[in-house]
Every structure is written in structure tokens, then in C-alpha cells.
Image (tube, rainbow, N blue to C red):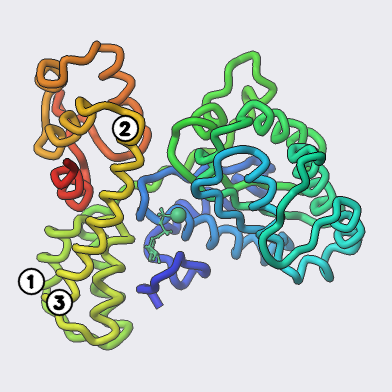
């Protein structure tokens, strides 16, 4: 099934992305860690899960941890512990004793007592899990760890040198913690051991159309090329938005309604994303984004916003690291039509 309302889990569910899967598998076989980067709805979580699933065939156990909105390292440790499947208790023999020692019960929300060092629990847990088995851990949206970043990076480094059985797949945007992971300072212990970067871009139009065609044919829905071209011109080529449309058609909704609903939902999500980005920034940032919805030159944005060159440079770099904007011939532009529309709605 190509169109689902959740991240893809198996290779059959994931359209295109073969090169990325193979690259990830080769990297892991050579002991490298992986960073999957892209804008929301590019398919990061899906790729990470499919890679972990493929690795299962090579004897890896896997653990998925969603770090969206996590904040600090303590909350991160709690998320990791809350993500442990019950089945791990049978598959990892001394895990039960380990958890009992820290007074942790799996299945449900785990709260760590204040007296326990979260970094230490995490370290011990990962070492415990990789003592006898190979384990791949997906840390989804890792840049959301905002507190205790240094501590966390040091923890990763210790794990990197302590065991060969443990592989991390990080997903997210190249900001905050992820940025440091990808570009460690020469003095950092992680220097020269950065994760292998896999960037998920929006598809080209042909691939997007092929995705829609294949998905709709698979569920036996008659469709015209004209309809599909309309979808791509409205929704762009990010897998997520397209699958919003495809899913609706596959459950029997007509073209117009599917497109309208998909668009409404997509713009809402994109607006959310943009709100998050603008959160700690002033009115000028809204203005800059709105300008970039149409496409604007650096000098124009600078003149309109009145901020310093440094402030603007940092902002644009962040937006590029988020894969929200691209620069072409000196013109900065929001690449995706859904995000463009969302930016224009921001007040
Ligand atoms: N390559 C792909 N083939 C099929 N569906 C995809 C693909 N990539 C993403 N999707 C679909 O798009 C939606 C968003 O994907 P997700 O992996 O959650 O993106 P991200 O984590 O980057 O926000 C999901 O419903 C998923 O099923
Ligand atoms: Mg995701």
C-alpha cells in the first residue's frame, strides 16, 4: 500500500528512495551512523523505519523513539524508556533486572526520579541493549533536544567508542544538536565520525506523478493525467502532501474533494511548522518569509525588514538548513507550494 496515514514501515510501502536505503545500509554495515535530513513531510521517519526494518534481516533489533517537542535530556531519557516495547523484556535477558534497579516499569509513560542522572540511565540502557545484540535506534527529530545538548553529545561519543553493536539513525533538520553532530569542531571527540548525511528532497515532477499513478492504480482507482498534474501543481512534490491526496482517492472520494481536503490539511500542518520557526523571532521575520513566498532578493529583504545583515544571514541560513527555502540566482524562495501558501497566511 503506497498511501497510508502513518509513516511507511516496509520497503514495499516506500516509493522511490532505493538509493537512500542502499546508502544507509552500506553505511551501517561499515559501522557508520546516519542522519536523515529534510523538511516535514519529505519522508524522514518513513525512510528511517524502512532502513531499520531492512536491518532486522541482518540481525539487528530496533528501537524507535519520537523526540518531537522533547526539550531537555531528562525528558529525552523518559521518551526512550517509554518507547521500549514490552517484547524487549523477553528478548534482552538482563533488561528486566536493569530496569528494576532504576525502578522503571515499561509499558506506559516512564517518569525518572530526580535523583537519577538521566544521561547515566541512557548510557547504561544503550550499553545493556547492545551488549549481546546489534541494535539500531532511531532518534526521530533529534534537534528537538534543546537542553543538555553537550551532555548528550558526550554521551553519544562514549557510546560510539564503547560498543560496535549500536547504530543510531538521527532524523530532523540541520539545526541545533543535529548541526553540531554533522559539523563537530576539530576539538570535539566526534570530529571525523559524523553520521553519514542523507538528504531527502522533494521529488521531481515525473517521480511525483509516477507515485500518484502507481498508488492509485494499486487501489484500482481510475484517474486522468490532467487530475494528477493538477495535484502536483497545487500540492507540489513532497511525498507527504501527495499521500494526503492519494489516501482520500483510495478510500473513494472524488478528485476535487480529495484535493481540496488534502490541501487544507497540508496548509494547516505547514502553518504549524512556520509558527514554530517564527516563534522566537520578531515581526521582521514574518515579513521576510512572506516576501520569500513570492521570491525576493537579499537586498530587498534587508531593506524591507531593516534588520542587520548578520541577523538576516543567520535567519536565511536557518531556513535553508530547514530545507524551507532555496536560493537561485540571488533570489530566495520558499520551495514548496504548500509552505508558500502557509507563509502567506501568517499574520
Ligand atoms: N517514499 C515514500 N513513499 C510513500 N509514502 C511516503 C514516502 N515518503 C513519505 N511518505 C508518506 O508521507 C507521509 C509523511 O512521511 P513521514 O515519513 O512522516 O515524513 P517526515 O518524517 O519527513 O515528516 C507519511 O504518511 C508517509 O506514509
Ligand atoms: Mg517524521
Cα gap from disc 3 to disc 2, whole angstroms: 33 Å
- Please give the name of the residue rendered at 27% of the width and 73% of the height, measured from the top-left corner: 246
- Residue 175, position in %: x, y? 45, 32
To which quarter of the image does residue 249 belong? bottom left
Q: Are marks 3 and 2 in contact (CB under 8 Å)?
A: no
Which of these two is toward me, 148 or 7?
Answer: 148
Q: Are marks 1 and 3 in contact (CB under 8 Å)?
A: no
Crowd tier of the residue under label 2, counting other residues whose Cα lies within 10 Å: few below 14, some 14–19, many 20 or above: some
Q: Report the residue marked by disc 3.
A: 257
CB of residue at label 1: within 8 Å of ligand 1?
Answer: no
- Please give the name of the residue rendered at 11% of the width and 72% of the height, measured from the top-left corner: 227
- Please give the name of the residue rendered at 21% of the width and 60% of the height, measured from the top-left corner: 206
CB of residue at label 2: within 8 Å of ligand 1?
Answer: no
Q: Quick check: 216 above or below 90?
A: below
Crowd tier of the residue under label 1, counting other residues whose Cα lies within 10 Å: few below 14, some 14–19, many 20 or above: few
- Residue 313, position in %: x, y? 28, 18
What element does badge 2 sit on?
helix
What element does badge 1 sit on?
helix
Considering only order in the chain, which callout, 2 or 3, is on the residue closer to the N terminus?
3
Residue 320: image tag: 2
Cα gap from disc 1 to disc 2, whole angstroms: 32 Å
| Ligand 2 quadrant in view | bottom left
Q: Do the residues labelled 1 and 2 touch (CB within 8 Å)?
A: no
Amino acid at each position: 500500500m503506497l498511501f497510508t496515514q502513518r509513516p511507511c514501515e516496509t520497503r514495499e510501502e516506500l516509493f522511490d528512495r532505493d538509493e537512500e536505503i542502499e546508502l544507509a545500509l552500506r553505511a551501517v554495515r561499515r559501522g557508520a551512523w546516519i542522519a536523515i535530513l529534510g523538511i516535514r513531510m519529505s519522508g524522514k521517519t518513513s525512510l528511517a523505519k524502512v532502513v531499520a526494518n531492512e536491518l532486522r534481516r541482518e540481525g539487528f533489533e530496533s528501537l524507535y523513539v519520537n523526540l518531537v517537542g522533547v526539550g531537555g535530556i531528562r525528558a529525552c531519557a523518559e521518551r526512550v524508556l517509554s518507547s521500549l516495547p514490552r517484547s524487549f523484556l523477553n528478548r534482552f535477558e538482563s533488561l528486566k533486572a536493569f530496569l528494576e534497579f532504576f525502578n522503571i516499569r515499561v509499558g506506559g509513560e516512564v517518569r525518572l526520579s530526580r535523583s537519577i542522572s538521566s544521561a547515566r540511565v541512557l548510557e547504561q540502557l544503550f550499553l545493556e541493549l547492545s551488549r549481546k545484540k546489534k541494535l539500531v535506534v532511531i532518534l526521530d527529530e533529534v534537534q528537538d533536544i534543546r537542553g543538555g545538548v553537550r551532555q548528550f553529545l558526550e554521551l553519544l561519543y562514549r557510546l560510539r567508542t564503547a560498543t560496535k553493536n549500536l547504530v543510531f539513525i538521527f532524523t530532523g533538520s540541520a539545526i541545533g544538536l543535529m548541526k553540531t553532530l554533522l559539523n563537530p569542531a576539530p576539538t570535539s571527540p566526534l570530529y571525523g565520525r559524523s553520521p553519514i548525511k542523507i538528504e531527502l528532497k522533494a521529488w521531481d515532477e515525473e517521480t511525483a506523478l509516477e507515485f500518484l499513478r502507481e498508488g492509485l492504480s494499486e487501489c484500482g482507482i481510475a484517474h486522468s493525467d490532467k487530475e494528477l498534474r493538477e495535484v502536483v501543481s497545487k500540492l507540489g512534490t513532497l511525498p507527504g502532501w501527495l499521500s494526503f491526496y492519494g489516501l482520500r482517492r483510495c478510500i473513494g472520494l472524488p478528485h476535487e474533494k480529495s484535493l481540496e481536503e488534502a490541501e487544507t490539511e497540508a496548509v494547516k500542518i505547514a502553518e504549524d511548522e512556520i509558527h514554530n520557526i517564527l516563534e522566537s523571532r520578531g515581526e521582521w521575520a514574518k515579513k521576510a518569509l512572506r516576501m520569500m513566498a513570492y521570491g525576493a532578493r537579499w537586498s530587498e529583504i534587508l531593506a524591507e525588514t531593516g534588520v542587520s545583515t548578520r541577523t538576516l544571514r543567520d535567519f536565511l541560513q536557518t531556513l535553508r538548513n530547514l530545507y524551507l527555502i532555496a536560493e537561485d540566482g540571488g533570489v530566495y524562495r520558499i520551495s514548496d507550494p504548500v509552505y508558500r501558501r502557509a507563509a502567506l497566511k501568517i499574520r
